[in-house]
Image: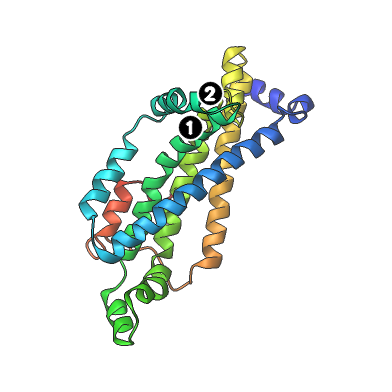
Amino acid sequence: MNLVWTWLGDPANWQGYDGIPVRIAEHLAYSAVTLLLAALIGIPLGLWIGHTGHGRIVVVNLVNGMRSVPTLGLLFVAVLVVGPLLAGDVAFLVPSIFVLVVLAIPPIMAGAYAGVEGVDPGARDAARGMGMRPAQVLVRVELPCALPLIFGGLRSAALQVVATATLAASVSLGGLGRFLIDGQAYRDYGQMAAGAMLVAALAMAVDLVFAAVQRLVVSPGLGAPRTTERFPGRGLAARSGAFAS
């Protein structure tokens, strides 16, 4: 720990193009782009499956299959396949974002699916009785009620992405993973441990931000379901890691 505090306390490590603030900004940029793309794919797909009831078996198999893919191995394969088609840093950035999106989609999609599936059937019936169309039922009734689980999926995905974005450094990109890779190369164990602590602290900070946004967006009367018997979709979301602790 003395090595960690010595490295963190060195002003030189907080300055320049490879300083801690720059690496944190790079790490956040990778994570933000990944979560945005994964949300654009996972949330609509999860809402559609939960609303229509189609593809439940497919989504379970897809979620489990995508989560079992070895991230580092997929990254190297993506770089070998896509890298030669691109130039400069983009040749490494695109495969890295792709792999992180693959990692982030399952919890986001499962959270959206489980949230819509867990909506009280009485609320749906009341909306239809008022003359709402299926799309209106989804947007005005199911989506607001599903927000707690949707945010649960987003928070879980954010934690995974922030932690795994360190792999980008293994293909010559930036981010906090540089401290792990460079520290290992120079046998600077203080730098490696400090880098790991920074990643953990950043993941906790991102989770707190999502929690604060969730409190602002989600109605206080809504809460995550507490039993899998009443809301079967929660079991899927829990198994796929859609709930942040």
Q: Nearer the viewer, mark 1 or mark 2?
A: 1
Q: How dense is the environment of label 2, judged by Cα within 10 Å: few (below 14), some, or many (20 and up)?
A: some
The residue sitting at 30% across, 83% down in the picture is 126
The quarter of the picture where residue 141 lies is: bottom left
Q: Which label number is shown at residue 68? A: none
The residue labelled by disc 2 is 171
Question: Extreme top residue here?
Answer: 186
Q: Is residue 29 above or below residue 40?
A: above
Residues at marks 1 and 2, CA–CA distance in whole angstroms: 10 Å
Q: Total of numbered circles in the picture?
A: 2
Cβ–Cβ under 8 Å for marks 1 and 2: yes
The quarter of the picture where residue 133 lies is: bottom left
* Image coords of residue 97 (percent x, y): 50, 37
* Image coords of residue 237 (percent x, y): 32, 52
Mark 1 residue element: helix
47 vs 204, left or right, is left
Q: Is residue 4 above or below residue 206?
A: above
Question: Extreme bottom residue here?
Answer: 130
The residue sitting at 29% across, 59% down in the picture is 49
Question: Extreme front residue here?
Answer: 85
124 vs 8, left or right, is left
* Image coords of residue 230 (percent x, y): 24, 65
66 vs 134, nearest the viewer:
134
The residue labelled by disc 1 is 95
Earlier in the chain: of badge 1 and badge 2, it is 1
Identify which amino acid the numbered label 2 is placed on: Val
Identify which amino acid the numbered label 1 is placed on: Pro
69 vs 189, left or right, is left
10 vs 132, nearest the viewer:
132
Any part of residue 45 in sight: yes
> Where's the N terminus, which quadrant?
top right
